[in-house]
Amino acid sequence: MAVTKIWNIRGKAGSPLEYIANPEKTEREFTEPEKQALQDVIAYTTNEDKTEKFYYTSGINCSVEFARDQFDTVKMRFGKYDGNVAYHAYQSFREGEVTPDEAHAIGVQLAKELWGDRFQMVVATHVNTKCVHNHIVINSVSFKDGGKFHDCKDTYRQLRETSDRICQERDPRGKGVSQYVYKMEKAGMPTRYNVARQAIDESVALSLTIEEFKSELRKRGYNYRFDPQRKYWTVTPPGWKKAIRIHQLGENYTREAIERRIYENDPSVRQQRLRQNYKMPNHYNLRRRIDRIMGRSGLEKLYLRYCYELGYLPKYRQNPTKLHILLKEDLLKCDQYSEQAKLLCKYHVNTDEDLSLLMEKIEAKMTDLLADRNDMRNRARRDLPESEKAAAREKAMELTTEIRELRRELKVCSQVQERSAHVRENLEIIDRDRQREKER
């Protein structure tokens, strides 16, 4: 959601218009005559061919080029020159939350909905900082009835609420979700938000009261603050310091929605779910996937075990809410660890020496293939029959594909060299923590 502010402007109406027209957002220094001539400044700064920091401007009930004169004309018409000459509203978005086009469209819609039926305004979107933001300059006198713009707490409340609603309507990600998180969730990758949703859903399904809901969250390692005096309920996932306001997770995760879902639970269905979640003790020494992994050795075993802990092995999915805290960061790198494990198994690499030898073999093979490809390319340039030249080009393309694959494998080997110590250390800590749990 965007951050919003509004404040009054005294003095000349041209000052805020000059500011939002961005005289300080470009690398060019303006002269004093240019600063005095509002039309020239706006015309200059809205010309993308003349500025490196392009921004967007729109006039509502007025023209951007003649906004200051049109503001003054309305004041003269109703004889209202005293007091505030304009008001300046501000709307800022988080880094990466919206594009400049989206930000400008939101700013224009916001201004039109709130004051477009009575006041003249100029909306400008600045893109010179990491956070795209809108500036809205509002004439203090209404062109419709000559009434003064009334700035009070209720005005700011309407600004904030309307801004939040428009952002939510235009953005399917929902409240408080960045573009990066939205893309990650859309791609099916785990984030702290969808992991929190899963933990809450599981806890709600097994609860008949709020106290039982809290207990289920504690079992999953979550901290919470459900103080009735607080405006928002929050949960903090295990391994994180920053809390999540649960209403940001979606419509089904507001305080009212969670209470409703809990109280609507059927006790008989809850008992059935509890029985489904209960696992019978293993009375038989059946060979499991983890047993097959532990039968390996060296780096091959190390990476297969790590992929197993991350839940990335075929036909097996780890519950993200039950992962060890150390694995949370690497959960987003599952694909890379899986690729490294496959390479180690393909070449049966067990030791660091085996890995170094493999890298040397790959580099030597790449050198030979590069020389062969160079010969084929030279052959394709000679004065030969077209069929022979075509065959040489085709062979060069085949060699390029092989070289590309070898480069990929060499890169994976380098990643194994860099991360093997990290993987080994994490697994040692996980085993030690589990042993302590058993001793308790």
Image (cartoon, rainbow, N blue to C red):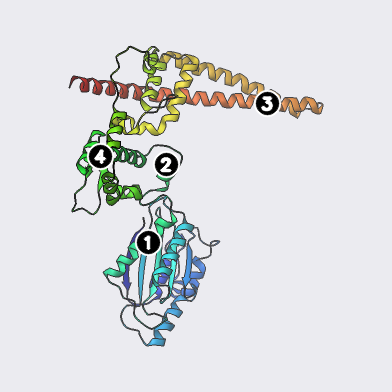
Query: In the rendered structure, which amino acid carries the disc numbered 4?
Result: Ser
The answer to which of marks 3 and 4 sits earlier in the sequence is 4
Q: Residue furthest right?
A: 385
Label 4: how many Cα within 10 Å (few below 14, some 14–19, many 20+): many
Q: Could you say which disc has been placed on residue 185 in the image?
A: 2
Residue, disc 3: 396
Q: Position of residue 299 (x, y in %)?
A: 40, 17
**Where is residue 7 drawn, in percent x and y?**
31, 69
CA–CA distance in space, label 1 to label 3: 58 Å
* Residue at the farthest front position: 268
Give me the C-alpha separation between circle 1 and circle 2.
Answer: 25 Å
> Which residue corresponds to the image point at 82% horizontal and 26% vertical from the top-left?
385
In the rendered structure, are the residues bearing label 1 and label 3 in contact, judged by CB atoms less than 8 Å apart? no
In this rendering, the answer to whether 245 lies above or below 19 is above
In three-dimensional space, the C-alpha distance between marks 4 and 1, rounded to whole angstroms, equals 36 Å
Q: Looking at the image, tell me whether mark 2 or mark 3 is earlier in sequence order.
A: 2
Which one is closest to the eye, mark 1 or mark 3?
A: 1
Is residue 83 in view? yes
Label 3 residue SS? helix
Choose between 218 and 87: the one closer to the eye: 218
Residue placed under numbered mark 4 in the picture? 207
Do residues under tags 2 and 4 come within 8 Å of each other at their CB atoms?
no
Cβ atoms at labels 1 and 2 below 8 Å apart: no
Residue 163: which disc? 1
Mark 3 or mark 4, whichever is nearer to me: 4
Which sits earlier in the primary sequence, circle 1 or circle 3? 1
Image height of 95 relative to 219, above or below: below
The residue sitting at 26% across, 38% down in the picture is 267
Vertical position of residue 297 compared to residue 4: above or below: above
Q: Earlier in the sequence, mark 2 or mark 4?
A: 2
Task: Identify which residue is drawn at 30% across, 24% down.
Answer: 279
